[in-house]
Image (spheres, rainbow, N blue to C red):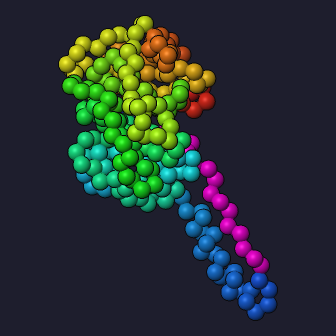
Amino acid sequence: MTGSIGRRGFIGAAAALGGAALVGAGAPLAQAQEAPARQAVRQPRPDTVAIPAGFQPEGIAVSAHGTAYTGSLLDGSVYRFDLATGAGRIITRGEGPMSVGLKLDPYGRLLVAGGASGQIRVVDAREGRVLATHQAATGTAFVNDAVVGCGGAWFTDSFADVLYFLPLGRDLSGPGAAPRALRLGGEWDPVPPGGAYWGANGIERTPDGQALLVVHDTAEALFRVDPRTGAATRTVLDGGSVRNGDGLVLHGRTLYV
């Protein structure tokens, strides 16, 4: 599952409106017509965004242009909206499996963690079409959060001591497109099987982009994970806490939990 931070971190300044100056008899009319446009630019961006009733949003992904996406815990639907105006619509109608954490990849696709279904879905961010569905896990599983980096996309499983790695490329159907599991080791605290305890939850990249940061819910600790070996090292925090560390967002060298 993922969280969110203030919209100012995602949206740049609004584009300035330009117009040609008119002279002569038409000038007063031009001034009168320009005033509403200037007022529209000054309208404040919404502090909250209305989501369809019963949607049960969880997880958020935001493009560089301020378009945001959230998934439904209820049925896996995906809602797309504009952070500047709050306007949006459902682009993917869910058919059962939930949508939990989600991230955008470099190809304009949403990578969606499927929670208890054990699935990872790839969705066209423009049209909402489900392009591929991967069964990353079977049995007791909860594919929870996602991050893009360290060579591909990474997903946590809160009921197993593994991360799932999805190679990122244009091909979604070849033999190299399926996710593979990376077992967590080193200082990672093993989670008892059965789904009674939560392990890996929020996930991000380190500031240097060379490793992964993963929250362990039960241990209430943040771990640095080597994406090549799965070796985890407990991170010593200089202030703050990762208790209930659901979504993570890295901004510079500051981690928002």
The residue drawn where x is 42% and y is 7% is 187
- Residue drawn 29% across and 53% down? 93
* The N terminus lies in quadrant: top left
Which residue occupies the extreme right position in the image?
23
Whether residue 19 is in magenta: the answer is yes
Question: Would residue 179 be found to the left or right of residue 21 on screen?
Answer: left
Tell me if 31 is positioned left or right of 207 in this view.
right
Q: Give left or right: position of 109 versus 91.
A: right
Q: How many marks?
A: 0
Q: Residue 78 appears at what percent x and percent y?
A: 35, 49
Percent position (x, y) of residue 33? 64, 80
- Left or right relative to 102: residue 67: right
Quadrant of the snapshot with the C terminus: top left
Q: Is residue 173 above or below residue 45?
A: above
Query: Which segment did they paint magenta?
Result: 5-21
> Is 245 drawn above or below residue 105 in the view shown?
above
Q: Nearer the viewer, residue 250 or 242?
A: 250
Q: In this view of the protein, which residue sits in the foreground, 147 or 151? A: 151
Q: At 67% from the left edge and 67% from the top edge, which residue is drawn?
A: 17
One can see residue 91 in this view? yes
Q: Main secondary structure of the magenta part?
A: loop
Name the residue at the bottom extreme. Answer: 25
The magenta stretch spans residue 126: no
Task: Using the rendered image of the protein, determine whether residue 7 is visible from the camera's viewpoint.
Answer: no
* Residue 109: image location, x then y, percent: 46, 45
Where does the image place residue 42, in percent across and percent down from the top left? 60, 63
**In the image, what residue occupies the spot 25% across and 32% down?**
116
